[in-house]
Every structure is written in structure tokens, then in C-alpha cells.
Image: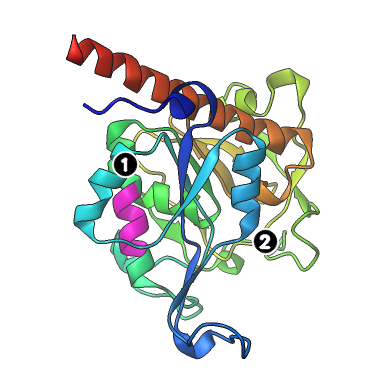
Amino acid sequence: MKLRSLASREHRPLIGVTTSEVRPKERVHPVPEGEPIGKEMALGITYLKAIEDAGGLPLVMPPLAEEAIEPLLDRLDGICLSGGPDLDPALYEAKPHPELGPIEPELDRFELAIAARADAREIPILAICRGTQALNIVRGGALHQHLPDISTEIGHRQTIASTEASHPVEVDPDSLLAEAIGGTEVDLDDVNSFHHQAIDRLGDGLRISARAPDGTVEAIEDPSRRFLIGVQWHAETLTHRPAEAELFRRFVDACRDDGAEYERAAKREVA
């Protein structure tokens, strides 16, 4: 087993971040001085900034072939599953809803594969929005494909900036999430909201750790794991608030500790 670097063990864990979107060349608008038109991957830089500010080293992961996933995970200390478009309902054996948005099967394939294998390795995972839904599907869960069918009490596609909150949430005080946002020292009263789909059937081994007033699941976790948390809101754009900044800090700390444990195991194996 290859030893981790000193930077990974003691200072800045390497954290893979999934691509949010793959844009076909027809949707790419380059400047005249730019590269030739072609398919591009897209990811908001706010994910990377939130991880960097919390002490981690973010690494953007493009959709790769299946055989590349295990070698990639060998080098990572944590995984952040990013937001993005609707997920293909075929992934949880459902028929498409008439209001289903554009889907990206290539992105779905890679994100679910890397989430499943990272989960099997018990690598720390922080999932955001679509990433939370993907994590739920990996665990055998299903989604509501069109939230307005369930409730119109709250607008889950806010029109104000992502740096502002739009609706309240209730966090289970006994959850890993509550601990990760600072326990009793940090309150989380409201969040932003940019999702079209939401969790319906909960995946195996997961528990709900936060809900919106209309009952929509806003956070999930695996209480048996050191860090496996998914939030439906875009926490990466709210790190100017103590709760979200603490969430990312706790995630990076878990990735750092996981890397250190990997190193200790490697030393035992070498000995």
C-alpha cells in the first residue's frame, strides 16, 4: 500500500469534487481568443473555494471510465458530490415525469459509480443538492421527480441570489449534521434552495437529519459513519455563515483524519 504524502496526512487532504454539468458544444459560447468549440465540463468555483478555505485541496473530477475510479479513489481522502441537473429516473426504476428536466446519463453513471465505491471504502462524503439525491439512489432510495406535485408551500427554486437564504429548516438536534454545524454553538435557521427533485424513498442505512416546513427532506446522513452527510441546500455558497463554514471544516477534518488512519494502516502493513 502506497503511503500518503505528508501534506495529505497532516495538513491538506485531497478531496475529489464531481463535475456539476457536461455541456455539449452547441451550448458552449467561447470568445474569439479562446479554444476550439467542444464538449465542456462545468462546476461552480464556490465548491472548490469552500473546501480550500476549510483547509482541503479540491480536485475536480471529470466523468471517467469505470476502470479509472479505483485508482482515483486510492489517491483521495474525501469526496464532495456536487449539485447539477435532474437525475435519470431509470436509476431507481421509475418512469420519467412529464416535467423531468434535462438529464445527463454520462454524468449520472460516473457520479453514482464513484459515490458507491467511495461509500464502500467508507471514505468521508459531503453531498450537495443533486449529490445528496445521488447518494440516496446509491443506497437504494428513490426521488420525487417534480417537487410542485408534492408541495407548493415553499418555492424550492428561489429567484434571489444563492448567497441568501429563502426558507427555514428544522435540524434534528441529535444528528451528525447538528454536530457538524457546531452543535448547540451554531444555529441553522434557514437555507437557500435550488432543486427540482427531492428524496422520496430513503436509502438503506440513511436517516433524515433535516426537513423543510413542507416536509421536504433537506438533509440525510449515515449515523454509523464518521462523516457521510448530504444537504439539499447549496452550503458552498453560504460559507460566509458560521454553520456552513463549520460544516466544511468538519468535513475536511474528517478527510484529514481518514488519510491519517490510511497512513497508520499502511505502516502496519509494511511492518
168 with respect to 260 (left or right): right
The structure residue drawn at horizontal position 41% and vertical position 47%, both measured from the top left corner, is 135
**Residue stretch rendered in magenta on the structure:** 108-114
Residue 65 image point, x, y percent? 24, 61
Looking at the rendered structure, the kind of residue marked 1 is: Leu
| Residue 150 among magenta residues | no
- What is the magenta segment's predominant secondary structure? helix
Q: Is residue 71 left or right of residue 104?
A: left
Q: Secondary structure at mark 1?
A: helix
Whether residue 182 is visible to the viewer of this picture, yes or no, is: yes
Q: Which mark is in front, 2 or 1? A: 1
Is 113 magenta? The answer is yes
Q: Which residue is mark 1?
A: 73
The number of numbered discs placed on residues in the rendered structure image is 2
Outermost residue, front side: 33
Q: Position of residue 87 (x, y in %)?
A: 42, 65
Say which mark, if any, is on residue 156.
Answer: 2
Would residue 224 be visible to someone looking at this image? no
Residue for point 65% across, 24% down:
173
Would residue 110 appear left or right of 150 to someone viewing this image? Answer: left
Q: Quadrant of the N terminus?
A: top left
Residue 95 screen position, x and y as percent: 34, 72
Mark 2: which amino acid? His
User: In the picture, residue 63 is in which quadrant?
Assistant: bottom left
User: Which of the two residues, 98 or 32, is positioned nearer the viewer here?
Assistant: 32
Between disc 2 and disc 1, whose residue precedes? 1
